[in-house]
Amino acid sequence: MERPALLKMMIFICLLTACNGREIKIKTGDDTANFNHTLALVLAEYASAVYTVDLSELFSWTCARCNNLTMGFEVIELVVDIQNCLQAFVGVASDPNAIVIAIRGTQENSVQNWIEDFIWQELDLKLPDMPGAMVHRGLYGAYNNTSLRPAIVEAVDRIRESYGELPVMATGHSMGGALVAFAALDLVMNHGIDNVHLMTFGQPRIGNAAFASCFYKYIPNTFRIVHNRDIVAHLPPYYSFYWKSYHHFPREVWLHDDIEQICDDSGEDPSCCRSVWICSINDHKTYYGLSMEAEDWSTCRIIMDRSLPYQIDVAGNIILAKDAIGPSIVMPISQKAAAM
């Protein structure tokens, strides 16, 4: 079947399964107090910056996307998994005073092709300590079975050894949002880090309802931001009548008509993005006016100054890391206590 036909079929499925046309209501009350608009703008910049192709500019935080609300951020480790076309960084920020993890979204080929392929993936991987929970094998493996996981965990450990128990802010767009969700869960479940905050942009579904429920219990400080009619937020399809169906974890924030609508804690609020009648690829490419795509979508090419402190593993993956952490823009916990 030709790709245009597949895309049309995918949009048709979106209309049938994800959209119900209910009237939109602006949510108010205690739930809205937990969402921080300014923090969303900051993390959106990190999610946009990680798409930078020039590793020299990204590692030194001098890229064109690094000069606004995130200015002064200090990258501690930057990893590029060549074989799987993945990229991520871990660093420290002064505002918010936190460790920031960002993972890049889809890079190889076009977003249209990726969407068409993604819809046919199966939910088939059971997780230990999560009864009934199932996740997308490919996305789960893209974090756990690549160079991303060891690099991210090692960097977080090094930073916390130097600066104490800083909170972790994890972010990413598209597939990067899915992978960073698994990273956040890994840090909480397997490494005992309690203060983990997750905010993703245009993230697809990654597990079933049992997984979504367990995920939210482990990481209650979670927001999935969806821009208007972003088609990826509807993928893979959700079927309310099927217990193995993919199901979003809470909590969605739906951006539409200059409104940030805080959705309910079901993960599949029918009055939020599921209420739209047609989906959009273009709405997936920008969040808060920021570009959420690389300069070149056709390849996984990179640009790097060979004088940078980099290592290449046996698989050809690149890791740039600072040998020593500091002096830093973030004050160590011990110094902060002494200054008070």
Image (tube, rainbow, N blue to C red):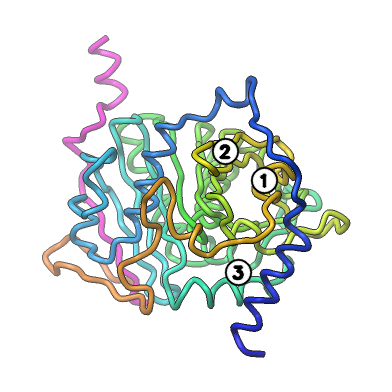
Callout 1 amino acid: Phe
Q: What segment is highlighted magenta in the picture?
A: 314-340
Q: Which residue is drawn at 61% across and 42% down?
A: 252
Quadrant (top left, top right, bottom left, bottom right) of the C terminus: top left
Left or right for 84, reference 128:
left
Residue at 43% in and 75% down: 108
Question: Measuring 73% from the left and 53% from the top, which residue is drawn there?
Answer: 247
> Going from the N terminus, do you reach mark 1 or mark 3 first?
3
| Badge 3 element | helix
- Mark toward the viewer: 2 or 3: 2
Spatial CA distance of label 2 from label 1 is 9 Å
Mark 2 near mark 1, Cβ–Cβ under 8 Å?
yes
The residue to which callout 2 is attached is 222
Pick the residue in front: 72 or 149: 72
View extreme (bottom): residue: 1
> Badge 3 is on which residue?
138
What residue does disc 1 label?
249
Residue 258 appears left or right of 298: right
Q: Reply above or below: 102 against 330.
A: below
